[in-house]
Structure formats: C-alpha cells, structure tokens
Image (tube, helix red, strand yellow):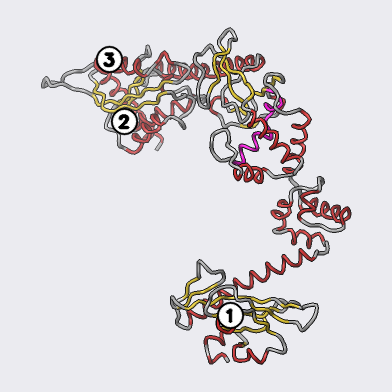
Amino acid sequence: MARNATLADRRQSSSYALLIRVVSLNMRKNSSGTNISIPTAIYLRVSTESQNYSTQHQRAAIAQYARDNAMEIVREYVDDGKSGLDIKRRAGLSRLISDVQAGDANFKAIIVYDVSRWGRFQDVDEAAYHEHTCRRAGISVVYCAEPFQNDGSPVASLLKSIKRTMAAEYSRELSAKVFGAQCRFIGMGYKQGGHAGYGLRRISLAADGTPRRALQYGEAKGTLTDRVVFALGPAHEIATVRRIYQLYIEQRASEPAIVRLLNSEGVESEFGRPWTHCMVKSILTNVKYIGTLAYNRKSGKLSKTREQNHMTAWVINESAIPQVLSRSLFDKAQLERARRTRRYKPEELLNLLHGCYRRHGKVTAPIIAADPLLPDPQLFVRTFGSLINAYDTAGLPRTKLNSFVEAKRALRNQRQALLTEIGALAREAGASVEISTTMRSTLILNGTITVRIDVVPFCQPARGLPSWKVWRKSDADFVIAARHESGTGNLLDYFLLADHDFGGRPLYIKATTMHRFAGMRYASTRAMFFRDAL
C-alpha cells in the first residue's frame, strides 16, 4: 500500500513537472502548425505599504510573460490595497482558491508576479498549502518575476521556502518599525489614526508645525509628512461631555438612561446619528478628555485578533490634548463604573441586601439605586429573576409595595392562563377564536363576538362587606370574570356577564348581591360551554 502511494506521488510530481515544462518551453505550435496556448489566470495584489508593485506594473509584467510563453489570460483575480498577512480579507485569492476547489477553473496555470504577491503569510506553510491546493487540481502556479522556475525541483522548493520566510520577516520588521515610529509621534503629541471623538477636533499640521486646517470626520491629512493634533471642539459638545459625567456620577443615571435622555432632547451626536451605548461609554472611559493621549490600548499586530492591552503596555502622553474634564472628576467616574460593572456572587448580593436593610429599615428599588454601597438594582433582577425574589431569598420582609407588585404579577399570569383556557374551550365547542390586537385580554369568537377575560382580586374596604369589583374596561360584548381568593390564590368561580349588565357602572359581587348573579355563575369554565359539565 505504501508502494502504491509512492508511485502515485511520483506520477503527480511528474505530471506537475511536465506542465511546468510545457509552460517554460515556449511551445507555440504543434505538429500540424496550429497555435497552442495554455488557458491561464493571473493573480494581482498590492498593499498600502508597497505601492511600487502596483497592479498596473504587475499586470504589464505578467502579460509580457504570458505572451512569451504561449499563455492566454482567461481570468483575473485582484486584491487591491490588501495586506498579504492572511487570506481572510483577500476576496480575490479566496475566490481563486474557491474556484479551484469547486472545479470551476477554466485555466491550467496561475501567474503571480512574485512569491510576496502570493502572500506574506506569517506561517509560511499557509502559502505552500494554498499553492498545493492548486497543484492538486492540476493547476500550476508560476512566479514570473522570480529568478527560478517553479518546477517542483528541490532547488525551486528551497528558494520558495526562503522567499516565503523573507516575505514574512519583512512584514514583522515593518510592523516593529511602524510601531516604534508611532510611539515616538505619540510622545510628540501627534494623533495616530482614528477620529477625534465627541467634544474634540483634529487639526492638520505641516511638517514644520504650522497649522493647516481642521479635518472633518472621515477626511485624511493632505500629505504623508503632515501631522495631526487634537483641539477642543464646539462649546456645546464640551458642555454635553461634562453633563454626561454629572448625570453619571451625581444623579447615578445608567448609560442607557443617558442615551435615552440625550436622544429625547434631540442632542446631536458626533456622527449626526442618534446616541448609542458605545458612544456614551467611550466618553466615560477615554482618557483623552483629561488631556492624555493613549496609544496601544488595543492591538492586533500582523492581522492577529485585536485584544485589550493592560495599562502597563499603553504608550501615554499626559499633556498632549487640551483638558475637557478635571482628573478628579474622571477618576470618580471610573470608580463609579468599577462599582457598577463589578461581578458579584449571589451570596455577596444577599449580604449587601441585609446591610441595606440594617441601614434603612427596608429595601426597595429606589433605595438600592441611591445607596452608593450597592450595585444597580437590575443586577439583582438578572441574578434572582426579580427584586422580590431577591428579597425572599435573603429572607427580608416584603413592603406593601412589594406585595402589591407581586399580587399584580400573579393576577396577570392567571389572567393570561384563563385567556388560553377559554380560547381552547371555545374551539372545542366549534367556534373560531382569535386574540384581539386592539383590546387587552380579549377574544373574538366567530369573527364578531368579543369576550374580555378578567381575574378579579378580593377587596376588603374600610367600611362595608368584602367584595369583588368587576370593571367595564372596554366595549366587549361579554366579560368572563373569575373571583380570586387572596389567601390561597385559587379561582373560586366564574361569571359570564353581558355588556348591558353593567349599565355603565362597575359590578360588585358580594354576599348581599350574589343572588343577582346566580344565573351568570359557573363552577368551572367548561360549564360555560358544555351543559353536561353542569
């Protein structure tokens, strides 16, 4: 079996070498005297750091090579202004490899200017892998500007490996040089790429430091020798930045709340679009508002995934920008943000609730929001499902408001369950059922009859008998009202009330009026629809 594999490898290598010889022998005519040409694709790439190898220059050199070697260019793949460090952002090369793998290639060779145009992959085996993919499909890769023939020979393989390593090393050295230059420019107070940010503006400087003009959003500097510095933006933007800090620190407003407030007031953002959470977060965390220019906060060198760097890796110039805020105000915002974003274990949150109860005598959402020792109330909601669940888990007594909110939630859930139950029984009885989109908790039967579903809580007035009050809340034809028992939470019975029974007033079901509703009262919902259930 191993011998067969060796033979197959030799045959594939021989086929590849034969194809290369066909390309390199400049064979123009066959025995009958007719022209022979090899269908060929070309791949062009130019990156921003190497404009000397423009696509026009590569195309001209490749076209000349094709003419000299009886090759007909039938397809072209181009990556213009793309880095050669990986294939992810190179649509041209990705499409070429995809066509080869799918069997859609109508060519037998690919001409590339040189090894570096194929790619400066940091893993040199990746370049070899993509070339092998083409070769396995019977398609050769030719580097027309290299001093060797890519014929699969040991010498060509060695030279290609050296060239690929040199191409990768070039990118690494260039990256180090660029990073060093950018760090020096930061020390001189010059901004390195990106937009200014809300409340600030970019100013272009000539090489001698003479200001040229303010740069608009998205506008690049005039020449490569120009430099860019920060300047203060319009007064209303500076006032908005300071207001955001005041809302966040003094009024304890959350970032989403600040976003909603600014948008409701029509305050225009830096981009002329509505404010977003990311915009407010950037203002609250970026050190440029205290006059500090920070570089290398995030990095993704050589096309690696961008990651947040520790502050020790930042390159900082503390006096490069006019101050918008004082350092003390910025530090307060960072402490407040750390408090709000800290991750708490459930046990820690329960201990904090106990401490809040000891300090205030009760625990409510407003008290939690105002207490500087506690995180945002929504953290308790996310951890325990609701604030009431958090109070119950902590063993704290409920306030009247807590009990009221919990009772309303229970009634709402029961009302929804009853709505579903009534709808199922109506369908079982042969009626068509749909839920009204204009009236809450209302069913439409047979397309014409509207039935409102309600769960009525028990009421004990200061004077008089206990009762259940049924409101006429909509123009429904009927109301199905279930009496809720406060102690157990059970539904006692059900009343089918017509709209004219209300007479424009709420109905009170109690001991002295129960006889009036005897014909409308049912022990179960099924009894309303089926006589045999009575």
Is-magenta flag for residue 291?
yes
Tell which circle, 2 or 3, labels the residue nearer the N-terminal end: 3
Relative height, residue 392 to residue 58 (above, below): below
Q: Which residue is mark 2?
A: 138
Dominant secondary structure, magenta: helix
Task: Name the outermost residue toward the right.
Answer: 358
Residue 480's disc is 1
Q: Which residue is mark 3?
A: 64
Residue 316's disc is none
Which quarter shows the C terminus?
A: bottom right
The magenta span reads 276-292
Which one is nearer the viewer's eye here, 345 or 490? 490
Q: Is residue 496 visible?
A: no
Relative height, residue 451 to residue 189 (above, below): below
Tell which circle, 1 or 3, labels the residue nearer the N-terminal end: 3
Kindly identify the residue that appears in the image at 21 percent across and 18 percent down.
27
- SS for callout 1: strand
